[in-house]
Image (cartoon, coloured by chain):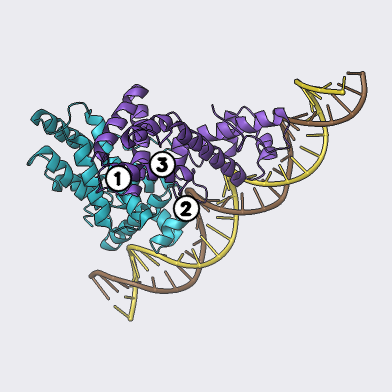
Chain colours: A cyan, B purple, C yellow, D brown
Amino acid sequence: MAETETAARDDGDTAARARTRRAIVAAAIEVLAGDGGASLSEVAAAAQVSRTTVHRYFAERSDLIAAVADEAIAQVTAATRRACLDRGPAPKALARLCREYFELGSVLTILFNGVVDITEQDWARCETDSDRELAATVARGREEGSIAPDLTDAWIVQLVWTLLYTAWTYVREQDVPRQEGLELCLRSLRKAVAA
Amino acid sequence: MAETETAARDDGDTAARARTRRAIVAAAIEVLAGDGGASLSEVAAAAQVSRTTVHRYFAERSDLIAAVADEAIAQVTAATRRACLDRGPAPKALARLCREYFELGSVLTILFNGVVDITEQDWARCETDSDRELAATVARGREEGSIAPDLTDAWIVQLVWTLLYTAWTYVREQDVPRQEGLELCLRSLRKAVAA
DNA sequence: CCGAAATGTAACAGAGATGTTCCATAGTTG
DNA sequence: CAACTATGGAACATCTCTGTTACATTTCGG
């Protein structure tokens, strides 16, 4: 949900093409979250489209990956906005952000695993605007005295992502209700960063 | 260090062959930690051995992967033993374990990423004896009242691995001293699991 | 309904990795 | 030295994935 227009439209697309393009990107996110090295055939199958069609929209594999990255970042940006990080106490804001990010599911995995594999370089989530907002909130909390002064911004940013990823893994592998995973994540984060 | 005999010897190996076999497995661990889909040529190059030689020791790729997995688990088992989990307060024991695991470096990454990719199934670290020991220590801490009663064993096990992985990533990406990453990891874990 | 747009099917060439074989060459050991 | 071991190098078939092309078929809007 919340597929706006970043990688969803190539401006020049008809409605039908836009639909197909989004279906492919969405399928790619799901498939690549499970296996970063998945073939285009698998993506095509997941999108219920022929491999040829995938190539019609994304000439090279890297083009699809780029679209996936764009879409993922767009979704994270939207989720960050919805969290209204500048409102209320910093710890509460972090919790709101986690709840929003948690809903992103596969997008979370894609980003955590370093844009799938983009250049095989595993540069993991490079600095995004969202990460900077998150870091700023952490800094605010530290000044307010609600966040531990001995933890760096970068560490806490990393920690948030890690805990979310852990929660998803936990839910998937332990076959536990989503909400339970999320609650454990929130509890652990709150205690870990508390002043 | 601590390469005992799990995947290092095929019993029937001369000293020379055992050396080569271990060099290949060690190189594979390093290379595959960086890229789970790395080719055998890359592994061979890293081991300073020809690709042919790699195939002499490991007929198929999956054989090498299996040897890597065995070696990784052996190292984790040894590290777990060194931590003497049954000694002292549970939180202290967990910290000792983290310090030991942290030293494993690439082995950590290999296991965290699900034995590289073994069957492409991303079954991530399945239950090992070490994990069970870790879980038992957590349970002990909970009974002693030193570990939060509202966090499940499985969650904390997952958390330990994730935090270690995060610490490594943090050190690598933020170009920060190893010890600083480790300390942040320990501090976060201690606070997160505290009763 | 008709035509253009969108998709599917099939085939192909090329790149890269795997796994195998054969032969040559170091190294080691008796 | 001589025999044996371990390794390197090159060549090969095979496989999978990628990217491209040509042609047939469906779909949908005017």
Q: Are marks 2 and 1 in contact (CB under 8 Å)?
A: no
Element at badge 3?
Answer: loop
Question: Label 3: chain?
Answer: A
Question: Label 1: chain?
Answer: B
- Residue labelled with disc 1: B143
Residue A117: which numbered mark, if any?
3
Q: Quadrant of the C terminus of chain B?
A: top left
Residue A76 position within the rendered picture, expressed as x and y whole percent measured from the top left = 23, 46
Pick whichever, A113 or D21, lies toward us: A113
Residue B79 position within the rendered picture, expressed as x and y whole percent measured from the top left = 47, 33
Task: Check disc 2: other Cα within 10 Å, few if <14, some if 14-19, many if 20+.
Answer: few
The answer to whether D7 appears left or right of A84 in the picture is right
- Which amino acid type is marked by label 1? Glu
Residue A180: which numbered mark, if any?
none
Q: Quadrant of residue A15?
A: bottom left
- Which amino acid type is marked by label 3? Asp
Label 2, label 1: how far apart the Cα atoms are: 36 Å
Residue B140 position within the rendered picture, expressed as x and y whole percent measured from the top left = 34, 43
Pick whichever, B56 or B39, lies toward us: B56
Residue positioned 45% across, 49% down in the render: B127
Residue positioned 47% across, 39% down in the render: B110
The answer to whether B104 appears left or right of A185 in the picture is right
- Residue labelled with disc 2: B121
Looking at the image, the residue that sits furthest to the left is A88
The reply to whether residue B67 is in sight is yes
The reply to whether residue A67 is in sight is no
Element at badge 1?
Answer: helix
Q: Quadrant of the N terminus of chain B?
A: top right
Element at badge 2?
Answer: loop
